[in-house]
Image: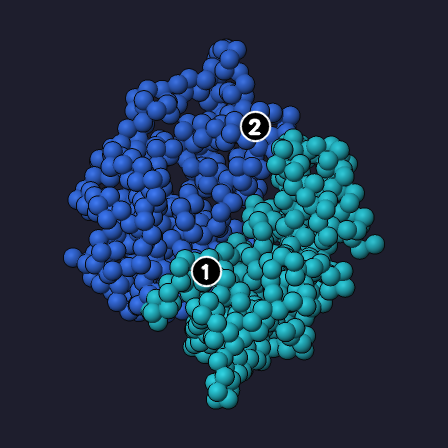
Chain colours: A blue, B cyan
Amino acid sequence: MKKSESERSVKAKKETVLKDLRKFGGNLYDQMEHGKFPWVEMPSRSTENIFYSPDVRQFILGEKSVKRHARNIRHIKPFTQMVWAGFFTSELVRNRKTSTLRDVYYSAQAYEMTFKDQPESNNILTDLETATGFAREDFNVYPEERSALFGDLTIEYTVPGYEGKQLNMTSHPDGVMLGPSVVSSEFAQNKCDKVIAIEKGGLFTRFIEERVHEKFNALLVLTAGQAPRATRHFLNRLNRELELPVYIFTDGDPWGMHIAMVIISGSANAAHLRGLTTPDAKWSGVYATDIVDYKLPTDPLTPVDIKRLHELEKDPRYTGDLWKREIKTFLKIKKKAEQEAFSRYGLTYIVDEYLPAKLDAMAD
Amino acid sequence: MKKSESERSVKAKKETVLKDLRKFGGNLYDQMEHGKFPWVEMPSRSTENIFYSPDVRQFILGEKSVKRHARNIRHIKPFTQMVWAGFFTSELVRNRKTSTLRDVYYSAQAYEMTFKDQPESNNILTDLETATGFAREDFNVYPEERSALFGDLTIEYTVPGYEGKQLNMTSHPDGVMLGPSVVSSEFAQNKCDKVIAIEKGGLFTRFIEERVHEKFNALLVLTAGQAPRATRHFLNRLNRELELPVYIFTDGDPWGMHIAMVIISGSANAAHLRGLTTPDAKWSGVYATDIVDYKLPTDPLTPVDIKRLHELEKDPRYTGDLWKREIKTFLKIKKKAEQEAFSRYGLTYIVDEYLPAKLDAMAD
């Protein structure tokens, strides 16, 4: 299920995806040729089979597995849907077209394959991920959301009409949209020595204007709130293929903290996948302790914020001194602060003072 | 208050903005030099002073005006805040830095200018817009949200570090982020003969992949839901400066219809501004009648959808046969459909069949 780290080339990966999908289908043919009802086996994604692994540093699936069997009348529908999903996504990859979960839902009707609703078709796509070990983005099914990046990295496109073309990620001062074409690109040349991921669009633009990419040799990545899966995968590639450390700056509240955590350790929903996490990425602020140290303008924590902090306290991903300390401090000061709060010291304070102090502390 | 259409050049406009802000401040000095308490007069934005103008084809403010007077103790705080806002934004424009409404709120604290909360500072920015007739984007205060564009248009940047540099809007196949740098750019060369604005990211990507920009000579603009103000202003520029017709494609529901309407006729909140609307833009689908004609997969209208349709029935912007007919049809069929619903006929049906049919019908 796990894909080898050496399958680095994007094109090679696409071929592996197609080969695996063909194997998935070929297997069903084999079963039938041997006179058997076809079936598929995959790890169970039920809650009691999801565990946090301190080794892998993400949620993983346990030993339990489920079978979808064409002999079982209750299985026939999801089994057929899954086979169709395998067919449809292999067509996408082969024809080099991208799609969205919503499109997959409606496209099914073109094949007289009906899904009750979109959650049902989403779930079948997740089954296909689980059975093959590939993420749906590998099948060219992308999220609608787009994030952005900016910095001295040159990518080489692999999408139709742009093969071999290169673009430097400083070409557009609003930032370069991080969509399917960026995700599926090869890294042609990189001059950055770190990645700074930023939660908010306003701050991303501020960092570009203040030339953070030059001053700190950084590739800036806008997560635009919770990072879309494709962006998390891209951060993983930057960290793994280019060996860049990743620093994550968010609002100083439980939600910002969790944006960082999902980039670092992923979510329980993706326990069946690898390559979406960046375990060595560092949450770099805004900490609860920063709120105190920098005397930032704050808002009081709401009851929902406090409830969330108590949930995070029990979350197996939130081990380690930093997380424990910051959760405790939030609960003690009962306050939160946004990234923009540093503007109380002038628009460039965050770049001139806070950011270098944080990066220094992180390098220790 | 209305700015002349001849102030087309972006750089010239920035100078006009600075000149007007200087005049705004100079006026206050004059009053004081004449031994008077300074005051500002501006049109009232209270509900009873907002009217829909069929001539201007947007909401406008009526004859009522309000005075902010430094002599009046209740006025001193908002008056001072407004003067500060004029100072702060003139600094932004002069130093060629951009900002957000949130940043303005926090920045105030650097000047010991306190706002109770962000709605209070937002409101003061709107006062400044009303008093000067410029939009906050003209003062370099931009929304956080970004939309995107793609097509054979070449822009020339005016932002620091990029002056004179050009970028063709087909340079990046995920689409080019439409942020402050694009909004403040000059049009260097254009080969498109129409603009197609699209609500959803998935469809925007589909249109790029299917080469809609080439097949239909179109500049594609992703609104990403309700178009941010900066994007609405940009659509206005494309229509006014390049004389491109604008066609808007949204989901087939009251919310999609209203995304189109706000691009066309603006909102009551912006009754004090000009240049954010594109009155000749056309809503081109998905119509309620398309749902019937194309037998699209649908969802039932919810009670909230139906309530919204009844509100739109009474809205002065929704005159004209098309709007009346479509509202009536929605209420009759009690169904809605998403743009992606066309995928039931295959992923490219929307580009191969629906889009050309619509553009033909629009050209009549």
Measured Cα–Cα span from mark 2 to mark 1: 43 Å
Q: In this rendering, is residue B230 above or below A286?
A: below
Q: In this rendering, is residue B332 above or below A43?
A: below
Q: Residue A40 carries which label?
A: none
Which residue: 45% across, 79% down? Answer: B94
Which residue: 17% across, 44% down? Answer: A321
Which tag is nearer the camera, tag 2 or tag 1?
Answer: 1
The amino acid pointed to by label 1 is: Glu
Q: Name the residue under label 1.
A: B120
A20 left or right of A246 in image: right
| Element on which disc 2 rests | loop
The amino acid pointed to by label 2 is: Asp
Query: Which of A240/B150 is in front?
Result: B150
Please tell me in which quadrant of the rendered image residue A45 appears. Answer: top left
What is the x, y in percent for residue A217?
31, 65
What is the x, y in percent for residue B336?
67, 36
Tags 2 and 1 both on a single chain: no
Disc 1 crowd rating (10 Å Cα; few below 14, some 14-19, many 20+) is some
Which residue: 40% across, 69% down? Answer: A209
Give the quarter of the figure containing the C terminus of chain B. Answer: bottom right
What is the x, y in percent for residue B39?
52, 77
What is the x, y in percent for residue B308?
65, 41
Pinpoint the chain carrying mark 1.
Answer: B
